[in-house]
Image (cartoon, rainbow, N blue to C red):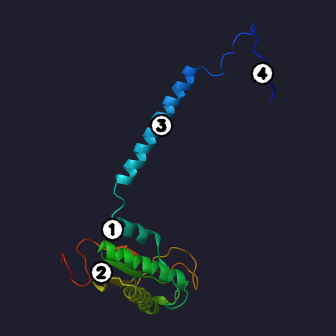
Amino acid sequence: IAALPAAGPDTPPRAPATPVSQLVAEAEQIDIIAVALAQTVALKRSLPGPSARERLEAWTRANAIFFDAESEYRDPETANRRLRELALLMKEAGSVVRIVGYTDGLGGLERNSPLSQSRADKVAADLRTNGAPADRIVVLGRAFSVDISSDLGPGSPNRRVEFEVGFDGESAGGGPGQ
C-alpha cells in the first residue's frame, strides 16, 4: 500500500473517496432492507403451517411401500420407518387412510387379486402395530393393474401399496360423520 503524501501547508485537503451524503443514503437503504427482512421473518413465524390433514395428504402423495415377492417388503427398514411416520400423521389428522395394494402383470388375475389384498392387509396390520387407529384404516386390493413401470418381477415398482386420504365422513368402523 502506498503511503499518502504528507499534508503540508501548501497541500489542499483531500476529498473522501465516497461523499458522506452517499454513505448516509446507502446506510438508510440498508436500514430499510433490514427492517423489511425482520418484518418478513416475524410474519412468517406468525403464519400457521400446514394443517395435520394437509401434511397427511402430502405424505400420501409422496410415499408408497414396495414389495419384492409375495408380501415381503423390498426394504423392511424403510417400510417400517414410513409406516411409523404415517401412523403418527393419521393419529394427528384423525383422517381415514385407504391402503391400496397392487401387483405387477405376472401371475394373472386369480393369483394377483388375493396378492394385492394380502399386501394391503400386511401394511394395515403393521400400521395398527405402530398405533394407527384401526377405525381409520380402509384396506383394498386392486384386482386390476395400475402400472407405474414397465418392469415386471421382483423389484418392480408395480408391486406396491399406495395410500389415499379418505373423504370427510368416510370411516371403516362407522365412526363420526357416518
Q: Tag 4 or tag 1, which sits nearer the N-term?
A: 4
- CB under 8 Å between callouts 3 and 1? no
Earlier sequence position, callout 2 versus callout 3: 3
Q: Earlier in the sequence, mark 4 or mark 2?
A: 4
Kind of residue at badge 2: Arg
Q: Which residue is mark 3?
A: 33
Name which residue lies at 25% across and 79% down.
171
Q: Which mark is residue 144?
A: none
Mark pair 2, 3: CA separation: 49 Å
Q: Which quadrant is home to the C terminus?
A: bottom left
Q: Which one is in front in this view, the residue at disc 2 or the one at disc 3? A: 3
21 and 94: which one is in front? 21
Please state which amino acid type lies under the numbered disc 1: Arg
Q: Name the residue carrying label 2.
A: 136
Q: Nearer the viewer, mark 4 or mark 3?
A: 4
Residue that badge 1 annotates: 53
Under mark 3, the amino acid is: Ile
Dot 3 or dot 1: first in sequence order is: 3
Is label 4 or label 2 in front?
Answer: 4
Give me the C-alpha separation between circle 3 and circle 1. Answer: 36 Å
Q: Which residue corresponds to the image point at 52% horizontal and 30% vertical from the top-left?
A: 27
Residue sitting at x 37%, y 74%: 89
The secondary element bearing badge 1 is classed as helix
Say what amino acid the circle numbered 4 marks: Leu
Residue 153 screen position, x and y as percent? 58, 85
At x 46% / y 92%, what residue is drawn?
Answer: 111
Of pointers 4 and 3, the one earlier in the residue sequence? 4
* The disc label shown at residue 4, or none: 4
Question: Residue 49: where, in percent of width, then height?
Answer: 36, 59
